[in-house]
Amino acid sequence: MKRIITAALLAAVSLTSCREGTVHDKAYLRAAAIDGGRMTLSFFPDTEPVEVSADTPAGALSAAELCLGREIFTGFTELVILGDCPPADTLSELFTQWELPPSCIAAAGRGSILLEVPPEQLSGSVRQAQAQGMLPECDIVTVLSALLSDKKTAQAPELDTGGVSGVVQF
């Protein structure tokens, strides 16, 4: 009987003490802008964006984690802005390795735009333009599916400091 109670207590302690950190131990990615070998990352709740240099998005994420001193969680990312990079390869890597949510907006623009304009303003302007029928669907799944289809092209909003400036063909 003592062994059963001891085993039950050990199981309860091991199940409740298994922690991968608290909410405060992580940085939550809100938006990413990729332009060549530079990546700008913006986080919830309105912390200063981080600029890093890396050859791959995975390398950029690691470099940003070192800068911040915290693990980065990408599951709530709202916006990805593509500058000078191959759109299909980059979006595919971001979607699979970073595990971005399917609702994440894929757009075109300069990588430094996140240093000038808050990400919520940019994603809000895209959503507003979509609601008004001015933009096609541009979530990462739709854009990536179109890029990987037989046509190998997709439409996405182009962003500048004023918000949506047009539609581009990837």
Image (cartoon, grey):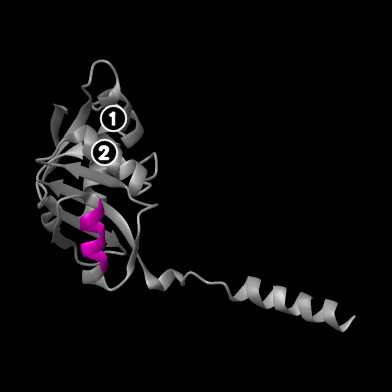
- Per the image, label 1 sits on a secondary structure element best described as helix
Q: Quadrant of residue 131?
A: top left
- Percent of width and height locating residue 2: 86, 84
Q: Nearer the viewer, residue 103 or 94?
A: 94
User: Could you tell me which residue is drawn at 11 percent across and 41 percent down?
Assistant: 83
Position of residue 58 relative to residue 139, above or below, is: below
Q: Do the residues under discs 1 and 2 have CB atoms within 8 angstroms?
A: yes
In the image, which disc is placed on residue 156? Answer: none
Q: Residues within 10 Å of mark 2 (few under 14, many from 20)?
A: many
Considering depth in this image, is 24 or 92 the residue closer to the camera? 92
Q: Secondary structure at mark 2?
A: helix
Q: CA distance from mark 1 to mark 2?
A: 9 Å
Question: Residue 72: x, y in percent?
Answer: 33, 62
Location of residue 24 (image quadrant) = bottom left
Q: Quadrant of the C terminus?
A: top left
Q: Compared with residue 70, is residue 61 higher up or lower down, i.e. above or below?
A: above
Q: Is residue 61 magenta?
A: yes
Answer with mark 1 or mark 2, whichever residue precedes in sequence. 2
Magenta range? 58-65
20 relative to 133 in the view: left or right? right
Residue on which the image places disc 2: 91
Give me the residue at 25% from left, 58% from top: 61
Which residue is located at x 48 percent, y 69 percent?
A: 20
Identify which amino acid the numbered label 1 is placed on. Answer: Val
Q: Is residue 156 left or right of residue 4?
A: left
Q: Please rate how many residues cluster around mark 1, counting C-alpha atoms within 10 Å: few if below 14, some from 14 to 19, many from 20.
A: many
Q: Which residue is mark 1?
A: 143
Considering the whole magenta stretch, tell me its main secondary structure.
helix
- For marks 1 and 2, give the one nearer the viewer: 2
